[in-house]
Image (cartoon, helix red, strand yellow):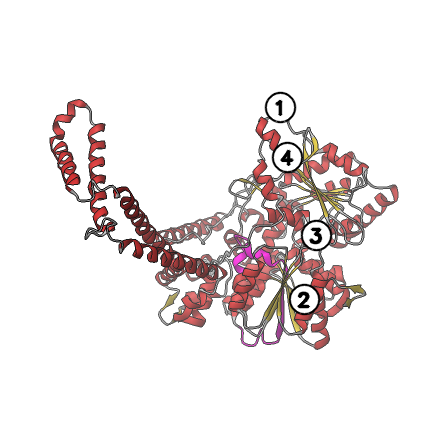
Amino acid sequence: MNFKGYELDLFQDQAIQALEAGKSVIVAAPTGAGKTVIAEYAIEKAIADGKQIIYTAPIKALSNQKFRDFSADYKDKIGIMTGDVIVNPEAPVLIMTTEIFRNIVFEGEEGRLDSIETVIFDEIHYINDIQRGTVWEESLIFAPQHIRFICLSATIPNFAEFGDWMRSVREIPIEIISESHRPVPLEVSIWIPGYGLRNIEFLKKLEKEKDSSTRPKKGGNVELVKRLRDENKLPCLYFHFSRMGCEEYAQYFRGMSLLKNEERRRALELYDGMAKQFGVNTNRGHALMMRNLLKSGVAFHHAGVLPVLKEMLERLYTMGLIKLLFTTETFAVGINMPARSVVFNNVTKHDGISHRHLTAREFQQMAGRAGRRGIDPVGFVYACVDPRDASYEAVSRMLARDAEDIESQFSLSYSSILNLYQQHVDEIYLVCEKSFNTFKTIGQVDILKKTLKNIETELSVIRSEKCPEGKQLNIVESMSLFLSKRDEFFRLKDLLRKRNRKKRASMFKTIERINQLKDEIDELECSKCKLMKTCRSRAMKARRYEKNLNEISSEAVEVENSQRSLLARRMGFLTDLGYIDEKGLLPRGIVASQIFGYELQFTELFFEGYFEELSPEEINVLVSSIVFESRRGDNFKRIRDNRIAGIIGQAESRIAQLRKMEREAGLPNLIKGLDPKLNSAVLEWSRGCTFEDLKKFTSGDDGDLVRSFRLVVDFLRQMKRAINEPAFGAKLDQAVKLIYRDIVDAESQLRSELGLEK
């Protein structure tokens, strides 16, 4: 089949044929294999047929990129809805984050999803994400049944199991399509600083020798990067799992001039032009650093960089004007910007709790950026391994062909529970047991029950066995008596042995009992039987089976009831707080059900009057305290306004009390405490200070500040939807206007970029 002038690969053709037949599809294929073509076909067909379609992406940056890409092809047919950007929301093709789609599903606005025929879930393997995976699962379970799904994923071993689960919760037939072939094969190598390119067996040899005499060189893997340059293996994506590391390495390689004079001139010209268009000050911070780095064709990219500056870099990268890009792993999520080579600075990372090795899935996701289809015959991947902190076994697992299975991360938020309770009341337990975890649990329970049945059968046989000598004795009964007396005999002997000689006299009763047991054992019919050992072995086997029966029965009950038990405790907690009763949602519950994220914090503070007397800028400060999460190592200036500081202090105490109640209810903490560290910066920004002035109030990265301010805007908009009071809504509109300006205003930037009218 041909689409847009390209002959489709077999898996693409199979997926499109399934869509033509009205089915949902799950497509698992390597990064760079061309899964997006399937989404583009569905979009083009929906537009042609006058249908509305939704495309969801796991992160806002990817949503924005898809909006730009699709808008170039389909003009005003494309709209976008994220927490901070709403453009053309009535368009036939709507791009949004998965959270926004889940929220629409739960809001249950009548007719809102009636016209939606298809939803595309890009990067569906995000369902495995510990923090956010539940959003994908909730969406698949609770979306209206007339919607079909196109699920696009990197290769996952248990995609068939995942498909079986989807069939159990969706009515529309689902076709599973798997593709293992990469259009551009990867050549994966190991680079050991001080030793150069080696194979994994060399790492095993080093580990055995415990050789740590050669320390890794500082300033990046200089020889490796030089080698890539000399062997014409640029552009290169160099993954480093530290923001500071990305910046330091970029500065280190700044002297490696990778651009020709004409390329350098063009890169700076484009950079300056985009900076002027988007209002980026190139005389400070990252923007100044980046301009100097660009002269050499080097740059860095991480979450602390201004979103608009990251967009500028991405454009220059796609134009071939950045040859060496140092970046954190977020660059690997969905963004279609491949390189000829990919380098991993290390194969371990800090996941917020501890340092650990990369998983096979993480490695494949990032390594998959190597190799440009239609340009490179092969993609080059280099894993830099420090033998002092990376083990042979862990590196072998990381390099394995098969990634880890995806697992359910289903964990309903309080808001989700409230929405489901409003719709289903008493049936909420049955509804919530549709999760992927429960589906897998049912399989586990079935296996356990089969095991139980087999053990019970075998145990029944043993219990019915008679004495092989022809005596009227049951083996298990007679041997059980023998074993119990024998066990007591050896226990008392051991106790006697542990006592010292001085205290032995006080053990007269114990010695007497030992002698008595010896006589009782000798009197048993079985004690002198030549087949006693055989019978004893059978009885002991029966003992083990009985123990296994109890353990497996308990495990089956625990596995079967774990999800229900947790939900029951959360429901009880909401009842105690006055959010629900036996009939449905109470006023507090109605408000909290309209807030997704920090719902209990806001609801408690709202009903206790914390927002009543606040001005718009003060509301921004309180909302920031709710949604902000500070990074370790950043410095913040304390707020000087005593009135606001006092209100925030009282609010902190109230939420701390709420968290304590949650713990006392035996629940894992879903309620985050308030974090007032950014309040001074938020207050000054709301009062009109410049973005440059914010450095007086925090050392946080520019990208973090913009993202935090946009989170405040997103939450303010949720508050307005939840509280239907015109006066309060007008105050919230003013609060949004104060904070959503200049470089924080993502919507204006996107419209300006595409030449759209507001």
Q: Are marks 1 and 3 in contact (CB under 8 Å)?
A: no
Q: Quadrant of residue 132?
A: bottom right
Q: Are marks 2 and 4 in contact (CB under 8 Å)?
A: no
* Residue behind mark 4: 201
* Residue behind mark 2: 15
Q: Quadrant of residue 428?
A: bottom left
Q: Residue at x 23, y 46 (%)?
A: 479
- Residue 550 position (above or below residue 79): above
Gap between marks 3 and 2, in whole Å? 35 Å
* Circle nearer the viewer, 3 or 2: 2
Q: Are marks 4 and 1 in contact (CB under 8 Å)?
A: no
**Residue 150 relative to residue 550: left or right:** right
Lower position in the chain sequence, tag 3 or tag 4? 4
Q: How would you rate the neighbour count of disc 1 (Cα within 10 Å): few for under 14, some for 14-19, many for 20 or more?
A: few
- In the picture, the quarter occupied by the C terminus is bottom right
- Name the residue type under label 3: Val
Lower position in the chain sequence, tag 3 or tag 2? 2
Asked whether residue 122 is drawn in magenta, I would say yes
Judged from the image, the secondary structure of the residue bearing numbered disc 3 is: helix
Q: Which mark is residue 213?
A: 1
**Residue 153 relative to residue 466: left or right:** right
* Circle nearer the viewer, 3 or 4: 4
Gap between marks 1 and 2, in whole Å? 54 Å
**Number of marks in the image?**
4
* Circle nearer the viewer, 2 or 4: 4
- Name the residue type under label 1: Ser
Q: How would you rate the neighbour count of disc 2 (Cα within 10 Å): few for under 14, some for 14-19, many for 20 or more?
A: many
